[in-house]
C-alpha cells in the first residue's frame, strides 16, 4: 500500500444497520441462510482450536464447483473486498490509471487511490466500449451496484478478450452474480473474478470470499494473500453454503419474483432502474411528496425502516436503493412508501 495514497484516500459510506429493531433495506443481504448453517458453524468451533487446514482444500473445491473453475485457481479471501484489494495491490503502482465504472461500488476508487493509482471514471453502461490499453487495470461490476444492470454476456466476453490483447488485467466483481443465471468470468485468461459469500448466503459477518485467476495474476495473489486468510468457521460454513444448490435456486426465484413485483409498485412513485440484482435503484421525481432524499430517508427511519441514500454514489443526486427482501417485509416497505 502506498503511504501517500493512504494520506489522500478517504473512507466511503455503505448501507446496513446493526440495530435489530430496524427493517434494513439499505444492505443487499439475503434475509435467509442455507439450511444447516448454524450447526456447521458450531461444529467448526472445536476445529478452530487449531490453525485452518493448509490451502483450504475443501473450501477451494466447493468454490471451484460454485464458480465452475479449477480448484487450483481459487484463492480464498476474507470476503470479496479482500479479493478486490489484493488484486489492486498486486497490479497497480503509483501513477497508474485504472478504469472504474460509475456510479458503482465506492471501494474500487478508494482501493486504487490507496495504491497511489488514479481512477478514471467511465459510465458503467459504457465500460465495455472503452479502450483498455491505457490502463493498468479495468474494473467491472456484474451486476453493477447500485444500478443492478450488467453488460450483455457476449459484449462482456468480447471486452475481456480486448483487455487480454491489451495486456490490461480485468477485475470482475461478481458479488451479486449468484442471484443471476449468468456465467462467471472465473478462469478466463487475463481476468480476476472476485466472489463474495456475503450477499447470496446472508452472511456478511462471516467475511468469506475468494478470487479466481490464472497465470501471473494467480501467482501474485497466492503470494500476497495473508496467511490463514479465512478462519476455520468461515471456511467450513462457506464450503457448506456454496454446496447449497437448492437454496440458491429458491433464492433466485424468490428474488426475481419479488423484484418484479416491487418494481411495478415502486414505478408508480419513482423512476426505477432495470435490475438483475437483489436491489432496485429508485429516482425521486421532482414532484415527489417527500421533497428530497434526506426527507424520505428520515421519514422511513421514523418507521424503523432503512433504505440506502444513493446520493453518495458518484453521479446520483435524487436516488435511493432498496433491497429485495422477503414478501411480507417488502410489503411493509411498499406500504410505508404509499405505493
Image: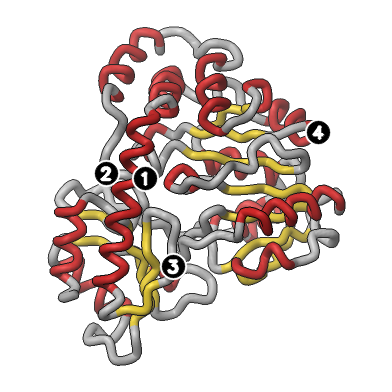
Q: Could you tell me which secondary element the residue under label 4 belongs to?
A: helix
- Viewer-proximal residue, 72 or 261? 261
Name which residue lies at 71% across and 61% down.
99
Sequence-first tag of 2 and 4: 2
Which residue is identified by label 2?
A: 31
Asked if residue 163 lies left or right of residue 11, the reply is right
Residue 330 versus residue 77 in the image, above or below: below
Q: Could you tell me which secondary element the residue under label 1 belongs to?
A: helix
Name which residue lies at 36% across and 38% down.
249
Q: Is residue 93 visible?
A: no
Task: Give the label on residue 216, or none.
Answer: 4
- Check if mark 1's residue and mark 4's residue have beta carbons within 8 Å: no
Sequence-first tag of 2 and 1: 2
- Viewer-proximal residue, 13 or 99? 99
Sequence-first tag of 4 and 3: 4
Residue at the farthest bottom position: 287
Q: How far across and how far down the image is residue 215, in percent?
A: 79, 31
Name which residue lies at 26% across and 44% down.
31
Sequence-first tag of 1 and 3: 1
Asked if residue 36 lies left or right of residue 144, the reply is left
- Check if mark 2's residue and mark 3's residue have beta carbons within 8 Å: no
Which residue is identified by label 1?
A: 252
**Residue 204 is drawn in which quadrant?**
top left
- Check if mark 1's residue and mark 3's residue have beta carbons within 8 Å: no
Task: Give the label on residue 180, or none.
Answer: none
Circle 3 residues within 10 Å: few <14, some 14–19, many ≥20: some
Sequence-first tag of 1 and 4: 4
Q: Could you tell me which secondary element the residue under label 3 belongs to?
A: loop
Q: How far across and how far down the image is residue 77, in percent?
A: 55, 31
For marks 4 and 3, give the CA distance. Answer: 37 Å
Amino acid at each position: 500500500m502506498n503511504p501517500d495514497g493512504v494520506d489522500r484516500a478517504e473512507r466511503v459510506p455503505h448501507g446496513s444497520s446493526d440495530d435489530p429493531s430496524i427493517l434494513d433495506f439499505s444492505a443487499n443481504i439475503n434475509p435467509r441462510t442455507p439450511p444447516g448453517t448454524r450447526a456447521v458453524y458450531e461444529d467448526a468451533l472445536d476445529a478452530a482450536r487449531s490453525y485452518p487446514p493448509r490451502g483450504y482444500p475443501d473450501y477451494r473445491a466447493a468454490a471451484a464447483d460454485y464458480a465452475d473453475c479449477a480448484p487450483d485457481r481459487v484463492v480464498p479471501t476474507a470476503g470479496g473486498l479482500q479479493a478486490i484489494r489484493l488484486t489492486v495491490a498486486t497490479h497497480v503502482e503509483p501513477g497508474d490509471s485504472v478504469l472504474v465504472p460509475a456510479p458503482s461500488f465506492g471501494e474500487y476508487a478508494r482501493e486504487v487511490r490507496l495504491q497511489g493509482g488514479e481512477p478514471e471514471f467511465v459510465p458503467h453502461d459504457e465500460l465495455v466500449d472503452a479502450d483498455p490499453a491505457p490502463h493498468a487495470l479495468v474494473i467491472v461490476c456484474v451486476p453493477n451496484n447500485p444500478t443492478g444492470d450488467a453488460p450483455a454476456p457476449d459484449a462482456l466476453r468480447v471486452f475481456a478478450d480486448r483487455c487480454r490483447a491489451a495486456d490490461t488485467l480485468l477485475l470482475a466483481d461478481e458479488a451479486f452474480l449468484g442471484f443471476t443465471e449468468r456465467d462467471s468470468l472465473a478462469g478466463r485468461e487475463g481476468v480476476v473474478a472476485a466472489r463474495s459469500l456475503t450477499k447470496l448466503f446472508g452472511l456478511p459477518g462471516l467475511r468469506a470470499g475468494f478470487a479466481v485467476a490464472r497465470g501471473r495474476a494467480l501467482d501474485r495473489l497466492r503470494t500476497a494473500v495473508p496467511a490463514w486468510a479465512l478462519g476455520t468457521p468461515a471456511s467450513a460454513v462457506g464450503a457448506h453454503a456454496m454446496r447449497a444448490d437448492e437454496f440458491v435456486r429458491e433464492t433466485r426465484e424468490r428474488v426475481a419474483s419479488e423484484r418484479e413485483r416491487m418494481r411495478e409498485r415502486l414505478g408508480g412513485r419513482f423512476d426505477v432502474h432495470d435490475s438483475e440484482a437483489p436491489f432496485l435503484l429508485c429516482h425521486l421525481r421532482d414532484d415527489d411528496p417527500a421533497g428530497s432524499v434526506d426527507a424520505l430517508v428520515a421519514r422511513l427511519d421514523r418507521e424503523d425502516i432503512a433504505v440506502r441514500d444513493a446520493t453518495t454514489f458518484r453521479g446520483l443526486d435524487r436516488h435511493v436503493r432498496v433491497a429485495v427482501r422477503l414478501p411480507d417485509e417488502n410489503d411493509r416497505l411498499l406500504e410505508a412508501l404509499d405505493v
